[in-house]
Amino acid sequence: MLENDNNFKVSIIGRTNVGKSTLFNRLVRSNQALTFNRPGVTRDAKEKEIHIFDKKIILIDAPGMFDYAECDNNPILLDAINTKLDNIIHESNIVIFVIDAIEGITANDLEIANILRKCGNKIILAVNKSEGKVKEQAFIEALSLGFDNTLSISAEHGQGIDVLLNTIYNIIPDNFKVIENNLNNNNKQMVLKIAFIGRPNVGKSTIINQLLGSNKQLVADFPGLTREDSAFDFVYNNKLFKIIDTPGIRRKSKIYDKLEKISVTSTLRSYRHADAVVLVIDATSLECGFIEKQDITLASNVLKDGKALVIAFNKYDKTPYKKNSKPKFLKQTFDRSLSQHKGVPFLFMSAINNDNLEVMMNTIIETYNKHKVKISTSKLNNWLQYINKTEIMTSASVKFKLRYITQIGETPPTFIIFVSKKQEMRNDQERYINNHFKQHFNLQDVVVKLIFKNQSNYKSNPR
């Protein structure tokens, strides 16, 4: 599925809490990477394509090395992080090795230095937090590590960043200069941004790794592994997508940790900036014959935000269901619980076995395209004439009249209907019009916004 291209990769490596994510944010000029005064916050690698003058690189914020504080009692997590770090180091062209000027060189720093000397990459030693009196002494101590490119920086305050950028630039070969007409992944136009959301440990990162054809995201049988959202460009059927992995969302009553609250806030922000959302649900949770209330709430919130939604039941291979299953109780549950958006698409899949990934992608594209629908004014008003003649709309209880309709927006498709005596409309009558409209135009699984306005607000005389 993935079409790989040759990228020049620069990774930020170091032990925990030395300011790697702060440096990443400084270099990409954003607050993408989660920063928090606690060791081991970053677990997944975060990547961002950036330009250093006229050269293009992929900048990688790596997990902290020797994150033993949280991993001593979790060897699975430790092994996953170490494997990830090993892959990042060996795939990088340049490694920015960050140490803490205030703490000085530690035993872990010495061990990292030994690992990096053996990898054969270009190493830039960045002595971070070099503010004030510690700068000169820390720099002299850092020279003892023997790296040719040793710099004093302050990621938080921006000191020394220009020197760091110039050093990186001079190492990058000229063939990585940006060609003006080739800025966007070989001229491929971005189709849409897809966010994957769901509760912890449902397999979001596994799905993304399968789509990318690599182990970009940490995966282990350990809830809460992903702590911050990560975005990757992805080519499918010769079209460019951006896919976003997000931390698992638990019920608010179960969130006690301040860091987890920050992660959840990041998830909500990420999916609201996406064009389409895949809600991933663990298929084994269906064994009791119902869907968890939290999953229904997540789906409802996504739809209220006007996003194209696809529900993916992952790990079907651990259940009696088949990959083409369409259990009646699921459709009934969605139609009942998401009554304003009947027909929300769902599918069964197994990311680890690569089952139905293409079906998922095609369903996402199809659903999103429906959200981009444009309906001509003539077709809309033909429908309006038709519904005005229906039995319900001609009954004595209806004291208003639908006069004119036009489309005023898309994604989600938004329409304005001018009504005589709008104040006479009841909620049930408004719901009837909404449902009739979606059924008539085959938009049952699409978020549609119908705005009703008094005819007096319409100044011209529509025909």
Image: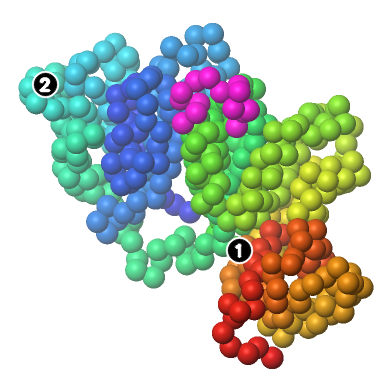
Q: Residue at x 24, y 56 (%)?
A: 53
Tally of numbered discs: 2
Circle 1 sits in a helix, a strand or a loop, which is it? loop
Q: Which mark is residue 225?
A: none
Residue at (59% x, 32% y) in the render? 248
Highlighted magenta segment, given as a residue range: 249-262
Which residue type carries mark 1?
A: Thr
Q: Is residue 77 above or below residue 240?
A: above
Q: Quadrant of residue 255?
A: top right
Q: Which residue is mark 2?
A: 134
For label 2, the SS is helix
Point out residue 370 in the picture as x, y percentages from the top left corner. 70, 65
- Residue 431 location (% of width, % of height): 78, 60
Q: Amino acid at mark 2?
A: Val
* Foreground pick, 285 / 335: 335
**In front: 238, or 293?**
293
For the point 19% across and 36% down, which residue is it?
157
Q: Quadrant of residue 183?
A: bottom left
* Left or right of 111, for residue 182: right
- Quick check: can you spot residue 167? no
Q: Residues within 10 Å of mark 2 (few under 14, many from 20)?
A: some
Of badges 2 and 1, nearer the viewer stands 1
Which numbered marker is on residue 411?
1
Q: Earlier in the sequence, mark 2 or mark 1?
A: 2
Q: Can you say which quadrant of the picture contains the C terminus?
A: bottom right
Is residue 393 at all visible to an observer of this figure?
yes
Task: Confirm whether the magenta stretch covers residue 79.
Answer: no
Q: State left or right for residue 153 relative to residue 294.
A: left
Above or below, 17 against 279 in this view is above
Within the image, what quadrant is residue 244 found in?
Answer: top right
165 displayed left or right of 312 = left
